[in-house]
Image: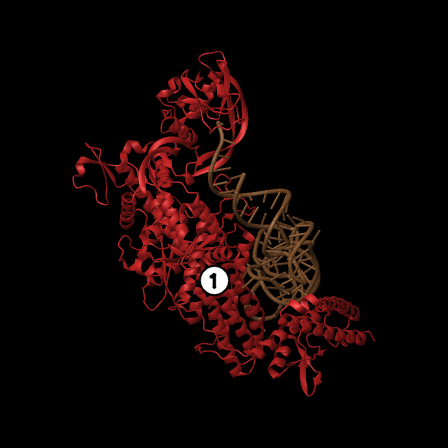
Chain colours: A red, B brown
Amino acid sequence: MLDQKYDAGKVEAGKHAKWIEKGYFTAKGDPDKKPYTIVIPPPNVTGKLHLGHAFDTAIQDSLCRYHRLKGEDVLYLPGMDHAGIATQAKVDARLKEQGISRYDIGREAFLQKAWEWKSEYADTIHKQWEKLGLSVDYTRERFTLDEGLSAAVKEVFVRYYKEGLIYQGKRIINWDPEAKTALSNIEVIHKEVEGRMYYFRYHLTDSDETFDVATTRPETMFGDVCVVVHPKDEKLNHLIGKQCINPANGDVLPIIGDEYIEIGFGTGAMKCTPAHDPNDYEIALRHGLPMPICMNEDGTMNELCGEYEGLDRFECRKRLTARIESEGNFVKEEKIVHNVGHSERTGVMVEPYLSKQWFVRMKPLAEDVLAHQQDPETKMNFYPPRFEHTFAQWLENIEDWCISRQLWWGHRIPVYYHKETGEIYCEVEPPKDIENWTQDEDVLDTWFSSALWPFSTLGWPDEDAPDLKRYFPTSTMGTGYDILFFWVARMAFSARHFMKDIPFKDVVLHGLIRDEQGRKMSKSLGNGIDPMDVIDQYGCDSLRFFLLTNSTPGLDMNYSTEKIEASWNFINKLWNAARYVLLNLPEGFERKTPEPHNPIDHWILRRLNETMASAAANIERYELAMAGNELYRFVWEDFCSSYIEFTKSALNGEDEVRREETRQMLAYLLEAIVCLLSPYIPFVTEELYQALNGEETSVNEARWPEAIAYDKEKADAVEILIEIIRETRALRSENDLKPSRKLEAVYEGKLKIDESLQAILTDMCKLQIIEKLEGETMVRPLKDGSLSFRLADIVDKEAELAKIEKELQRLQKEIARSRGILSNPGFLAKAPEAKINEEKEKQASYESAYATLLNKKKELAS
RNA sequence: GGAGGUUUAGCUCAGCUGGGAGAGCGCUUCCCUUACAAGGAAGAUGUCAGCGGUUCGAGUCCGUUAACCUCCACCA
């Protein structure tokens, strides 16, 4: 028997291991079933999972579990990402603790350390997935650096290369001096920072004339090749063709004209550093200027910088500025707030840097995706749809993707240079005479491999791989909007190009989880919440239910302890409801398909059927919160507060047949509830399912409940009774009437109170119907909220009169409103007929309620 | 400079195709009723940010203003 209190720790322990052992989540490939596929967004092997991962996977897992319940062949494919820079940085940091740099131990040894790190953190992640209860198919787990995926990466690189979609070029890229690697544009985060604008005085070589030039990065002056002014700038264009002195190093710089310069902006004259600024680079290209690099890879100054060689870029900036000032060429400095690029991973300021890198030509790939999205039949669907605009806009304005990284941890670029001829060899297989070739030192952007995830994990490049044939394209991609560009867009063009298809039918994008005050969770604020701590305290089910029912697709949500507790309360409620049911099932109870007998059975079946249909519809359009809240309401209000209360008299009564019927109903309802909730709260529902059906059963093998037919009239009757009962209970307590006292109620209307309904009334509120009309007891529908009692026995007349008065006023208002609408010619002419009739009925019912209540008032007053 | 989001009960937020405003928590009153007091019953509270428009009818659609937020792109 279940414990008195729900204990999440006890319930959740050991379950996941058993599920895996039983193979419930291994996709069987049953051809009679519809395939449903989700590939997990592979977490980085850099550390622990955070709340965002928990959110991601809660959504994916609940979808998978739902589709399993629906009898589909579900594949939830797990895997992890090697996370190039991020992991390498972690391993570097670990080595640093031991006083070693990666260069001390070399590439091979470093990679070994990295693999050790990987297996360590993969373990952690597996444990966390287990705690999260994920129904992933471990027989198909992948890693972005495993053999198969590496083969896919090589294949893709080679094919792009041969199609001219990958090229090598010298360009200004974003350089991370900390990680000493190039970055792609989206790995750069622009942050507003306070900086300074320095103004320096430049002297012409042939006269005493001077002019000012402003810069935020004085240290780059060692890479300057000219000064630029606008050809039409009347104040400055006379300088074009002359020469000036670079105050940093005394170099003679030509002054040129270029329309890039904005007249009137700054001083009107700009220094040009082609190797350290993308715009300057363009100018230098146009004018055929040299492009000297003045910085080392680690952000220190190089040999071009004389006395500053070896100094850090920022230190050089300080000292150089001071020196120029001492030489009298410093004009002023201003504090400014400007956007500066920072490395997404290391956080350091990114240096625009001229460098030879590999790029993917994005235009044709992006255009293919955009064109394909025009077809409403076969396009990817975005939830919420607005993200498709963001997605499309990004693709429309896309620039080439810098994919080479000067790292060791990653997919090595499959390009070989001939030691003598310099010839380039790019094939999946290395050249036969490998000793004559040198492989490119660089590795690929980590996103290059994740871009292939939906098909590389299924066996591609083997086009005939059975999983690829069966499970691709995948069904749903559930992830945060923050990686729409990084990942979703790149999967989209990769799948288009290599699979000639979309990678997934639906993209569900959720928001970020913020802290209780709505701030972003961050390490520096220390406001991050570890999902594992939450699980330890409240259980995985509470966490999942919280995440799934308190979020709106695409919007950020705030973490809330209060709402986690509310989720816990709900599960505890479910637990106790189950306990009630189980306590009332006798030894050796045999389950049968129940048949509704009592009116309340019909009513609860209708509520169940409505809830099932609506929950399914909502889950299928990814409105998990709506579906979850409906289930919550059904369980708490309909099942617990009403149905269970109704069953008490039956179960305590003498009528054995009725008892048995009630037990069958309860067992059926409990099982249905448990199944419906299992996608959200898999652990506790498993516990309850087994308590009901036996230790060896599993909710993982259950199917979506079968609906049972009900009688609508009986269901309607109970709907009304519930309202009567609630009203009556309120009266009883407010007026301090004893339960034994008979409260006389007068109802009029359509509903026939048969014995079973009378029994309910008697059981629930000791209410006895004594008014008889034409030999039958009648009650009046209370949909409009009115209720009329003969209150002769009620002690507190004043209070009752006040209540009636209030109600009369309300009705009066409603009648006025209704009359207003019905006398509106526009409404009568244009509203649908059903609406008009509905309104007329309402009006009639308000008026009759009003009349009845007025009589009551007179009667009571007299 | 572009694109988008948010503004609804004291707090946190739902409210998806326009037809009498909801939940959780909190608050008030009553109840230890034999599944649950982390419970049960009842109850109060809203110029749905402002303005304008469309409509018979707008929290919901359109425009506009304001505040806050996010992303993208950026000029030395």
For this orientation, the residue located farthest to the right is A862
- Left or right: where A670 falls relative to A27: right
Q: Give percent across and percent down for residue A367.
A: 39, 48
Q: Which amino acid does label 1 sit on?
A: Ile
In the figure, residue A648 lies in which quadrant?
bottom right
Q: Which chain carries label 1?
A: A
How many discs appear? Answer: 1
- Left or right: where A433 falls relative to A362: left
- Residue nearer the viewer, A457 or A112: A457
Helix, strand or loop at label 1? It is: helix
- Left or right: where A453 falls relative to A848: left
- Residue at x 67% of width, y 67% of height: A827
Mark 1, residue position? A619
Q: In this view, does A524 lie above or below A266?
A: below
- Residue nearer the viewer, B16 or A563: B16
Judge the density around disc 1: few (<14), some (14-19), many (≥20) Cα neighbours within 10 Å. some
Which quarter of the figure is the C terminus of chain A placed in? bottom right
The answer to whether residue A239 is visible is: yes
Q: In this view, does A791 lie above or below A213?
A: below
- Left or right: where A677 falls relative to B34: left
In the figure, residue B1 lies in which quadrant?
top right
- Residue at x 29% of width, y 54% of height: A459
Q: Give percent across and percent down for residue B32.
A: 63, 67
Q: In this view, does A645 lie above or below B17?
A: below
Q: Give percent across and percent down for residue A739.
A: 68, 75
- Residue nearer the viewer, A635 or A587: A635
- Residue nearer the viewer, A565 or A554: A554
The answer to whether residue A2 is visible is: no
Q: Give percent across and percent down for residue A580.
A: 52, 70
For this orientation, the residue located farthest to the left is A433
